[in-house]
Image (cartoon, helix red, strand yellow):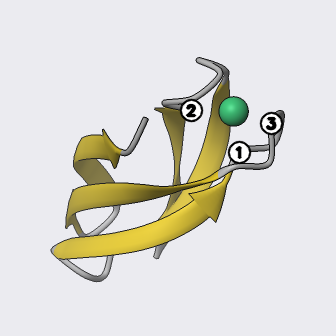
Amino acid sequence: MECPAEVQCPYCGQSFGLMIDTSQPEQRMTTDCEVCCRPFEVVAECEPGEVIALDVLGG
Ligand SMILES: [Zn+2]
Protein backbone atom coordinates (compact mmCIF):
# COMPACT_ATOMS: atom_id res chain seq x y z
CA MET A 1 0.00 0.00 0.00
CA GLU A 2 1.37 3.39 -0.93
CA CYS A 3 0.85 6.39 1.32
CA PRO A 4 1.62 10.03 0.68
CA ALA A 5 4.27 11.67 2.84
CA GLU A 6 5.89 15.07 2.83
CA VAL A 7 9.64 15.49 2.60
CA GLN A 8 11.79 18.59 2.72
CA CYS A 9 14.66 19.02 0.31
CA PRO A 10 17.96 19.35 2.23
CA TYR A 11 19.35 21.64 -0.45
CA CYS A 12 16.69 24.23 -1.19
CA GLY A 13 14.28 23.61 1.73
CA GLN A 14 11.24 23.05 -0.45
CA SER A 15 8.64 20.58 0.85
CA PHE A 16 6.87 18.30 -1.55
CA GLY A 17 4.88 15.11 -1.51
CA LEU A 18 6.22 11.63 -2.04
CA MET A 19 4.49 8.27 -2.26
CA ILE A 20 5.90 5.70 0.19
CA ASP A 21 5.32 1.96 -0.16
CA THR A 22 4.30 1.13 3.42
CA SER A 23 4.41 -2.63 2.90
CA GLN A 24 8.11 -2.47 3.76
CA PRO A 25 8.87 -1.65 7.43
CA GLU A 26 12.12 0.14 6.69
CA GLN A 27 13.37 1.43 3.41
CA ARG A 28 15.70 3.85 1.74
CA MET A 29 15.10 5.53 -1.55
CA THR A 30 16.66 8.23 -3.59
CA THR A 31 14.41 10.94 -4.93
CA ASP A 32 14.97 14.09 -6.94
CA CYS A 33 13.78 17.40 -5.57
CA GLU A 34 10.89 18.71 -7.62
CA VAL A 35 12.24 22.25 -7.40
CA CYS A 36 16.04 22.14 -7.62
CA CYS A 37 16.24 18.61 -9.12
CA ARG A 38 19.05 17.50 -6.82
CA PRO A 39 18.91 13.90 -5.69
CA PHE A 40 18.77 13.10 -1.98
CA GLU A 41 18.14 10.04 0.15
CA VAL A 42 14.97 9.40 2.14
CA VAL A 43 14.75 6.82 4.93
CA ALA A 44 11.23 5.76 5.86
CA GLU A 45 9.90 3.68 8.74
CA CYS A 46 6.47 2.29 8.02
CA GLU A 47 3.64 0.17 9.23
CA PRO A 48 1.24 -1.15 6.62
CA GLY A 49 -0.85 1.85 5.60
CA GLU A 50 1.09 4.38 7.67
CA VAL A 51 4.40 6.20 7.51
CA ILE A 52 5.78 6.39 11.07
CA ALA A 53 9.01 8.28 10.52
CA LEU A 54 10.76 9.94 7.65
CA ASP A 55 14.38 11.05 7.58
CA VAL A 56 16.11 12.99 4.85
CA LEU A 57 19.83 12.44 4.33
CA GLY A 58 22.09 14.81 2.48
CA GLY A 59 22.63 18.53 2.29
ZN1 LIG B 1 15.53 21.20 -3.71
Pointer 2 with pointer 1, Cβ within 8 A: yes
Q: Check disc 2 and report its element: helix, strand or loop.
A: loop
Q: Is residue 21 above or below residue 16?
A: below
For disc 1, the marked residue is 33
- Residue 20 placement (x, y as % from top left): 47, 64
Q: Is residue 21 visible?
A: no
**Some atom of ligand 1 lies within 8 Å of the CB belonging to the residue at label 1:** yes
- The outermost residue toward the bottom is 24
- The outermost residue toward the front is 59
Q: Residues within 10 Å of mark 2 (few under 14, many from 20)?
A: many
Q: Is residue 22 above or below residue 7?
A: below
Left or right of residue 8: residue 23: left
How much space separates mark 2 and mark 1, taking CA atoms? Answer: 6 Å
Query: In the image, what residue occupies the spot 71% across and 45% down?
Result: 33
How much space separates mark 3 and mark 1, taking CA atoms? Answer: 6 Å
Taking depth in this image into account, of 56 and 45 the one nearest to the observer is 56
Residue 9, label in figure: 2
**Some atom of ligand 1 lies within 8 Å of the CB belonging to the residue at label 3:** yes
